[in-house]
Image (cartoon, grey):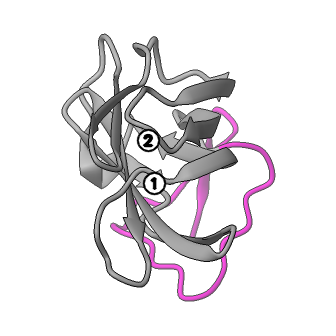
Amino acid sequence: MWWLAGGNLIWPFGNVTIKNNLNVDGSINGAKYYNFLFTHDGGTGSPSITNLFNNIGSNSSWTRVSAGLYKTTFTGITFDNTKVLNTRSVTIDNGDAQIIYLTYTSGSDLFIQFYDFATITAYDPAINRLPISLIYYPEL
């Protein structure tokens, strides 16, 4: 049995498990988003980022940390990896090569790591406008 409180459905009997798809019309309360386009020339310089939407908080410029590893730091937030939904591993066709990228958070940092799919070695690929989305649930 569900109850209503202030327009919200309440289930007071513990966890709810969804075995199939969950469709949400609207937004999940408290969810914050960072959507951006990642562009890089393949060299050792910093990537170019086009912010599409960001309500997580202010972040610094993106920098190249090492081969294929890029980072930005958010102010006033500490990510808890149990509350972040982001792209864990995606393979994309980069011209004649396939690459894998992994996004992850640590503390107030957001990282993107690129690997050559064939050799699984980190490297700096030339990428033109790769869309990336991060969803953070601070209220979980």
What residue would you read off at disc 2? 137
- Image quarter in which the N terminus is found: bottom right
Residue in the foreground of this view, choosing between 68 and 107 = 68
Q: Position of residue 84 (x, y in %)?
A: 39, 48
Question: In whole angstroms, how far apart are the C-alphas of marks 2 and 1?
Answer: 8 Å
**In the displayed structure image, the side of residue 3 where residue 107 appears, left or right:** left
Mark 2 or 1, nearer chain start:
1
Q: Is residue 1 above or below residue 67?
A: below
Residue 85 is marked as 1
Q: In percent of the image, x 58 and y 26: which residue is there? A: 48
Q: Nearer the viewer, mark 2 or mark 1?
A: 1
**In the displayed structure image, the side of residue 15 where residue 27 appears, left or right:** right
**In the displayed structure image, the side of residue 105 where residue 89 appears, left or right:** right
Outermost residue to the left: 107
Q: Position of residue 95 (x, y in %)?
A: 69, 68
Mark 1: which amino acid? Leu
Instruction: Identify the secondary structure beneath mark 2.
Output: loop
Mark 1 neighbour density, 10 Å: few (under 14) some (14–19) many (20 or more) = some
Magenta span: 1-27
Residue in the foreground of this view, choosing between 100 and 52 = 100
Q: Could you tell me if the residues under marks 2 and 1 are in contact, i.e. CB atoms within 8 Å?
A: yes
Mark 2: which amino acid? Tyr
Residue in the foreground of this view, choosing between 126 and 129 = 126
- Image quarter in which the C terminus is found: top left
User: Main SS of the magenta segment?
Assistant: loop
